[in-house]
Image (spheres, rainbow, N blue to C red):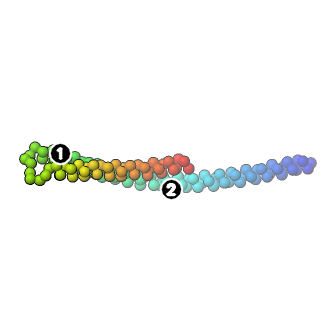
Amino acid sequence: MTEKTKELQNVKSQLGKKGQVLDDANKKILQLEKQLNSANQNVPQLKQELNSVQQSLDAKARELESKNKELEDNKNRKPSAVDTQRVKGKVNYASASFILSGMCAVGASLTILYLVICILHLS
């Protein structure tokens, strides 16, 4: 009879340990669900920011296209007294600088969005 009592106590002890592990797992699940909900609330804001940056980039691209067209139209006119090579260099530098800064902005926005998704996925 004492063997059965010891075995019963051992099973009760193991059951208590398993119950504690289950409680810990449930707490962790609740914590992760809260984090997921918090991150999901940030996704629309990040999408809105990304759309805003994209619209800004599109507007700047259209502006640059119109300026490039204007410059192309000015090629057919008489050269003025202004040093055209210097102006072209500035325009090329400005165009390249704008495009690179725009790419960095889009890259940063996308990186933040996908970083949140990756963090949520890995959690």
Look at the numbered disc 2 and give the secondary structure of its residue: helix
Q: Residue furthest left?
A: 78
Left or right, 101 with respect to 91, comes to right
Q: Position of residue 90 (x, y in %)?
A: 21, 52
- Residue at image x 47%, y 50%? 115
Element carrying mark 1 = helix
Q: CA distance from mark 2 to mark 1?
A: 47 Å
Whether residue 81 is visible, yes or no, is: yes
- Expressed as whole percent of the image width and height from the top left, the position of residue 92 reads 23, 49
Around disc 1, counting alpha carbons within 10 Å, would you say few (fewer than 14), some (14 to 19), or many (20 or more)? Answer: few
Of the numbered discs in the image, which one, if any, rests on residue 58?
none
Looking at the rendered structure, the kind of residue marked 2 is Ser
Circle 2 residue:
38
Question: According to the image, label 1 marks what residue?
Answer: 69
How crowded pointer 2 is (Cα within 10 Å; few <14, some 14-19, many 20+) is rated as: few
Q: Tag 1 or tag 2, which sits nearer the N-term? A: 2
Left or right for 38, reference 96: right
